[in-house]
Amino acid sequence: MKATRKYVMAATGTALALSLTACGGGDEDDRDPQAVLKAAAEKTAGTNSYRTKRQVTELDGTERGEYTFSRKPDLAERKTWRTAVKDGKKGPERFDHTMSEGEMLYTRDPKIAGGRWVSDSLLEEGEEPPKPEDVQKTAEGSLPKLLSVLRTSKDVRKVGSEKVNGHKATHFAATVVLSDLAAYKGDVMRDWLRELYVKNHRKDGLEKVDIDLWIGKDDIPVKGAEHGKGSKGSTAVTEEYTDFGADPGIRIPKGKDVITQDAWLREIRDKAYRGLDPVS
């Protein structure tokens, strides 16, 4: 479905007066791991915004990203720098910058549309927007998924107290077997998200995933990581979370800085007809 696909691709949705500088401190959390994870999931779901710094190593390349979002108003921003790998050789780094406001997506590439933002609806004409609980913004990073997957595991362990960016946090870890997750029947993870998680990791040749999560003061997650090694090679994702509840500072482009996708396509056709460069 176009809406679901674009929402996942979109950069990029109760406020908490917390930031990373307030995270950490105190001694190692002595509660049951599942109690901490539940509290962290509730705190994460309740916060209006946070920032994610993401580093990904996949089978076909690497990507680093900076994500920001807010729930009210419904805004998100996503910046990524990706380097593809083919036949063992690295290609040029590609920068992507997208924003979203409600059901509208904005994409900018300096090389196209005269450097303007190209806007397009996340929905087909007449299509109803998905329910909020059925949307996982890319700008939220992997945090909601990591919390949900860990809560389905029976072997979550407390590794110890560690420092993340100079602040104390309790480190939790588990090895999640995808066949166990696929068979999970509980209510801490929505079925569509669980099925998508299993499908995507099996596509990478994985049958189990090592997950680590660092949770600081007031049940605020500060770092997460996934690592897996399967039949096709190794994958890894590391994220850091900051600025919970802070103003994300997202400024949606307006006026002459924006052109709709339909208008841009008309420009391309007109330029092609006149024998001009059809891309710019």
Image: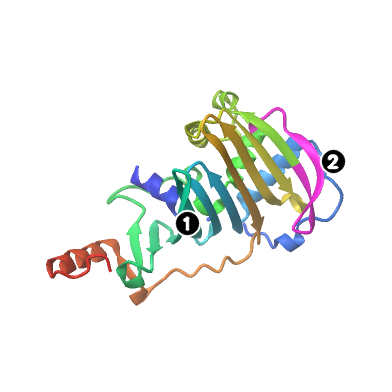
Residue found at x 60% / y 56%? 52
Left/right of residue 124 with respect to residue 149 in the rendered view: left
User: Which residue is the extreme one toward the left?
Assistant: 273
Crowd around label 1: few <14 · some 14–19 · many ≥20 (10 Å) = many
Q: Amino acid at mark 2?
A: Asp
Q: Residue under circle 1? A: 11
Q: Are marks 2 and 1 in contact (CB under 8 Å)?
A: no
Image point (32%, 72%), residue name? 114
Residue 158 in magenta?
yes
Q: Quadrant of the N terminus?
A: top left
**First in sequence: mark 2 vs mark 1:** 1
Residue 59 location in percent, x, y? Answer: 50, 41
Residues in magenta, as a range: 152-171
Three-letter residue code for mark 1: Ala
- Please tell me in which quadrant of the rendered image residue 240 appears: bottom right
Label of residue 30 in the image? 2
Report the magenta stretch's main SS: strand
Q: Position of residue 150 (x, y in %)?
A: 66, 36
Q: Is residue 208 above or below residue 267?
A: above
Numbered disc 2: secondary structure? loop
How crowded pointer 2 is (Cα within 10 Å; few <14, some 14-19, many 20+) is rated as few
Q: What whole-number distance in Å separates the C-alpha atoms at marks 2 and 1?
A: 36 Å
Q: Residue at x 37, y 47 (%)?
A: 3
Report the number of numbered marks.
2
